[in-house]
């Protein structure tokens, strides 16, 4: 077997990139960045799935409604949590290893597109990007799905170049795995079939062309077929249609644009991501410009590939992955995590700009042209790497910090008190950021207390959730404790005056959802005593159980 790194220089670069990954992606995984709410729900999904009772808080999870997420990531992450402990650092470590896999795939793809130097640039461009560092740490299925989609695209590159059946097979298989990890990658199914069909358009009458297209398409659709068969066997066709209908009702409640309007919206989303994404947001002032995204977007205009066809195919595959995300979302520059579906592939564009810059430097440099070109690439990559390193050494400030948990010690202290005064069968209401810290099985966030009584709100979906989808009564009266992250901090305003800024997810977001304020008013009316407080965390006890907590 031919080794990928044949010279000492190539081996040293490969080792250097692995060291770079370890330095940037592994330190302070557990606490940096802050815990986000979706992480708590993903921890819940994975933990309950691997124990055979797939649930998210009080809701039974059937992977369709109200949580439309396929189970592959839950299987992988759940197995790791069961082996190494139900702690967020385990799940974040999976994301970090996924980032290393993305770097390896980018080296392979870059080598196929041009040469090994370009492969190294693709991997390095991804690893130094601070948003990649942040979003591959957070616990979600999107990064894993994006990497599986990247593997599928790698084999599509091979198929365009050599038209081998095995590459079509692998492209279809990885596409199916990506779809089985996150539904945002569903357009890639069509892209796999379209690629094989177009590559063989001159030979469309031959059996080989039809064989490749049918095999690739069947494998790309394998997850969807297996899921439907399993669901019908477990729950029946009628329940499948009911749940799909509930899911599609969300889209039906939204305005339906014309075809031209949808195209315009997609173009606007792509443009906004590439050229208008800031580096910081609330509670920090909107500031800075994300130049990595701008450079990467520009790089897809003229990719420095050996095969001119791939200058068209690679941007096409990127747009296909983007469409799966932008079809559903318009807020990617703010929350950004859905971009991890296509973010690894964008590193190819960034590396393309570095390559063209290097070629330009060679034309004007008088001596040591190769070294000078490499120096320019190193300086650019080092600039972005230092920005990422600053977040690693200090703390990553994200555009969604205001919706994250603000203090790990305070959260752990509050939950240590709760766990010391609850049993496995007790019910606790708490922010979903810290679901995984609760040791009782029955847990819920405040919004479900309102929803269970028939007051619908936007969390987690803006449509009604029938009571038969709840596996226990999560009304306020049944809870033993209510844990709130609800505080304030003193700030100095630009004009010199002092004021208070709300701190904690319940203060900045949950309180504004329909029905939640009424639940908290009921808590006040029933005079739930505060039994623990530290920082922004407040633990209130149900008077029905207060004697047990003393």
Image (cartoon, rainbow, N blue to C red):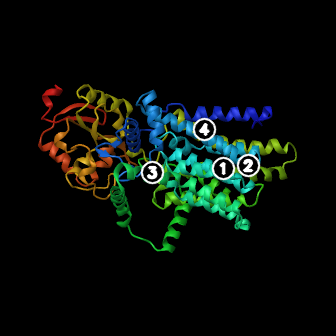
From this view, report whether residue 229 is shown above or below residue 407: below
Q: Which residue is mark 3?
A: 227
Label for residue 100?
Answer: 4
Q: Earlier in the sequence, mark 4 or mark 3?
A: 4
What residue is shown at x 41% (from left), y 70% (from top)? Answer: 256
The numbered mark, 3 or 1, whose residue comes first in the sequence reads 1
Q: Quadrant of the N terminus?
A: top right
Q: Is residue 235 above or below residue 124?
A: below
Label whose residue precedes the other's in the sequence (1 or 2): 2
Instruction: Determine which residue is flagged by label 1.
Output: 154
The residues bearing labels 3 and 1 have C-alpha atoms spaced at a distance of 25 Å
Which of the two residues, 351 or 42, is positioned nearer the viewer here?
Answer: 42
Q: CA distance from mark 4 to mark 1?
A: 16 Å
Question: Badge 4 local density, few (<14 within 10 Å), some, or many (20+)?
Answer: many
Instruction: Give me the residue at 28% from left, 42% from top.
Output: 444
Which label was assigned to residue 146? none
The reply to whether discs 2 and 4 touch (Cβ–Cβ < 8 Å) is: no
- Given residues 363 and 241, the one toward you in this image is 241
x and y, in percent, of residue 300 in the image: 67, 58
**Which disc is residue 112 wearing?**
2
């Amino acid at each position: 077997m031919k080794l990928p790194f044949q010279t000492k220089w190539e081996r040293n670069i490969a080792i250097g990139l692995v060291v770079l990954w370890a330095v940037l992606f592994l330190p302070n995984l557990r606490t940096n960045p802050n815990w986000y709410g979706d992480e708590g729900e993903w921890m819940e999904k994975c933990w309950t799935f691997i124990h055979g009772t797939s649930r998210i808080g009080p809701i039974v999870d059937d992977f369709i409604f109200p949580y439309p997420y396929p189970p592959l990531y839950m299987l992988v992450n759940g197995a790791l949590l069961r082996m190494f402990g139900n702690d967020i650092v385990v799940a974040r470590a999976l994301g970090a290893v996924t980032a290393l896999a993305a770097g390896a795939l980018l080296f392979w793809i870059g080598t196929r597109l041009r040469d090994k130097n370009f492969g190294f640039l693709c991997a390095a461009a991804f690893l130094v990007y601070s948003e990649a560092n942040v979003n591959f740490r957070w616990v979600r299925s999107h990064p894993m799905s994006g990497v599986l989609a990247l593997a599928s695209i790698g084999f599509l590159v091979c198929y365009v170049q050599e038209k081998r059946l095995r590459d079509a097979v692998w492209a279809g298989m990885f596409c199916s795995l990506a779809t089985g990890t996150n539904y945002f990658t569903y357009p890639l199914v069509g892209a796999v079939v379209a690629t094989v069909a177009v590559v063989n358009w001159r030979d469309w009458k031959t059996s080989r062309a039809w064989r490749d297209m049918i095999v690739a398409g069947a494998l790309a659709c394998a997850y969807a077929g297996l899921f439907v068969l399993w669901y019908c066997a477990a729950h029946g066709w009628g329940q499948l249609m009911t749940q799909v209908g509930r899911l599609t009702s969300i889209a039906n409640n939204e305005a339906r644009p014309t075809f031209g309007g949808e195209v315009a919206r997609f173009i606007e989303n792509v443009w906004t991501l590439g050229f208008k994404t800031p580096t910081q947001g609330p509670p920090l002032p909107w500031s800075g410009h994300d130049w990595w995204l701008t450079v990467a977007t520009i790089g897809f205009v003229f990719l420095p590939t050996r095969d001119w066809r791939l200058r068209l195919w690679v941007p096409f595959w990127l747009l296909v992955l983007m469409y799966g995300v932008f079809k559903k979302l318009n807020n990617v520059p703010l929350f950004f995590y859905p971009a991890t579906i296509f973010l690894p592939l964008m590193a190819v564009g960034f590396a393309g700009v570095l390559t063209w810059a290097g070629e330009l430097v060679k034309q004007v440099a008088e001596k040591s042209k190769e070294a000078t070109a490499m120096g320019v690439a190193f300086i650019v990559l080092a600039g972005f790497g230092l920005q990422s390193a600053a977040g690693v050494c200090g703390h990553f400030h994200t555009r969604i910090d205001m919706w994250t948990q603000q203090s790990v010690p305070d959260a752990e202290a509050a939950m240590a008190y709760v766990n010391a005064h609850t049993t496995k069968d007790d019910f606790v209401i708490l922010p979903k950021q810290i679901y995984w810290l609760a040791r009782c099985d029955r847990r819920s966030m405040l919004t479900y207390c309102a929803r269970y009584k028939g007051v619908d709100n936007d969390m987690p979906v803006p449509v009604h959730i029938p009571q038969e989808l709840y596996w226990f009564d999560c009304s306020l009266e049944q809870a033993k404790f209510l844990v709130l992250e609800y505080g304030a901090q003193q700030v100095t305003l630009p004009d010199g005056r002092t004021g208070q800024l709300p701190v904690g997810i319940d203060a900045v977001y949950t309180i504004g959802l329909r029905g939640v304020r009424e639940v908290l008013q009921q808590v006040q009316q029933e005079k739930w005593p505060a039994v623990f407080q530290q920082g922004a965390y407040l633990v209130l006890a149900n008077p029905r159980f207060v004697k047990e907590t003393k």
